[in-house]
Structures are given as structure tokens and as C-alpha cells.
Amino acid sequence: MMLGKHDERLALYAKRPGDRTVNITAGDPVAAARAWAPEGVQAVIDTVGSVPSIEALIGTLRRFGHIVSAGFHGLRGLIDIQKLRDRELTLHAPAGWTKERMDATLALVASGVLQTTHLITHRFPVDRAAEAFELILSRCEHVLGVILDWK
């Protein structure tokens, strides 16, 4: 189940049978999780920076489940670890990158295991890089993946 805040981005998720998307600003992620996985969810991955969503979903996690906080929370990124103890949940907080992780990610993309081309929303020739950057910053239209063509 993919949680997000933007229907346009959620629509890009390459669903397989049984997959689900929930807009946390319009839907109830707890009800959706319980309907989707009544036996419990193994992992919750937050990429949008929503501590309230993480905390709400704690009750849907299986024992020994995982929470991955990859979203930016700013100064409000406080999670009460005592709430994780009953189910012995783990909290992962990846940040930044390492050469090894980047190489592994690129290998997954190259092999087709990790598919990303459907996330490209815009392509620009390199001589329009300033325009591409302005689009990213302004968010005047839906933008997710921006590619600069160096040819």
C-alpha cells in the first residue's frame, strides 16, 4: 500500500494485483490498511513526512514489523519510541546516500527490478535546464521526475 498526499503522484505508482494507494489528505490510511491487510502490515514506509500517519498506522503493524521514515519532517519529526515497544517494532531512518547504496540502486534499475521510467513527468534539453529547475521549484504544475537530455 502506497500512501501519499498527491493524487497525481499516486497515479504513477505501478500497481500490481492487490496493491493499493491512499491519499492521506482524503482517505483513512488505518481503515485502508486494515481492509488491505487484515492480518497486519509488515512495513510502513513514510516518504511524505507525516508523523501522524506513522503513529496512526502503528496499530496495524504485525509484531516485529518495520517503520521506515524517509520523509522530511522538519522540526516536528518526533516519534514516541515507547509506542513501538508493545509489538517490538523497528524504526529505520535512512538519510543521505553512500556509494554502495547508489551502486546497488543503479544495478536494480539496470536489471529492470526497480522500474522508474513511469515516474518521469518532464523531459528538457540541457539548454533548458534553468526552465526545468524553475518548474521543480515553483510546482506550478504536477512534477515528479525531470530528465535533462544531454544529447
Image (cartoon, rainbow, N blue to C red):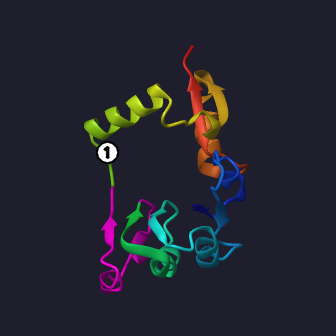
Q: Decide which of 53, 96 is in the foreground and name it.
A: 53
Give the main secondary structure, helix, strand or loop, of the magenta stretch.
loop
Magenta stretch encompasses residue 107:
no
- Name which residue lies at 67% across and 72% down: 25
Q: Decide which of 21, 103 is in the foreground and name it.
A: 21
The residue indicated by pointer 1 is: 97
Q: Decide which of 144, 28 is in the foreground and name it.
A: 28
Look at the image and give the residue range highlighted in magenta: 70-94
State the image coordinates of residue 126 (x, y, percent, origin top left).
Answer: 58, 23
Q: Quadrant of the N terminus?
A: bottom right
Horizontally, is 16 left or right of 101 in the view? Answer: right
State the image coordinates of residue 91 (x, y, percent, origin top left).
Answer: 33, 68
Horizontally, is 11 left or right of 136 in the view? Answer: right
- Name which residue lies at 71% across and 58% down: 7
State the image coordinates of residue 119 (x, y, percent, origin top left).
Answer: 61, 40
State the image coordinates of residue 138 (x, y, percent, origin top left).
Answer: 64, 51
Quadrant in which residue 3 is drawn: bottom right
Identified by mark 1, the residue type is Trp
Work out whether 95 lies above or below 61.
above
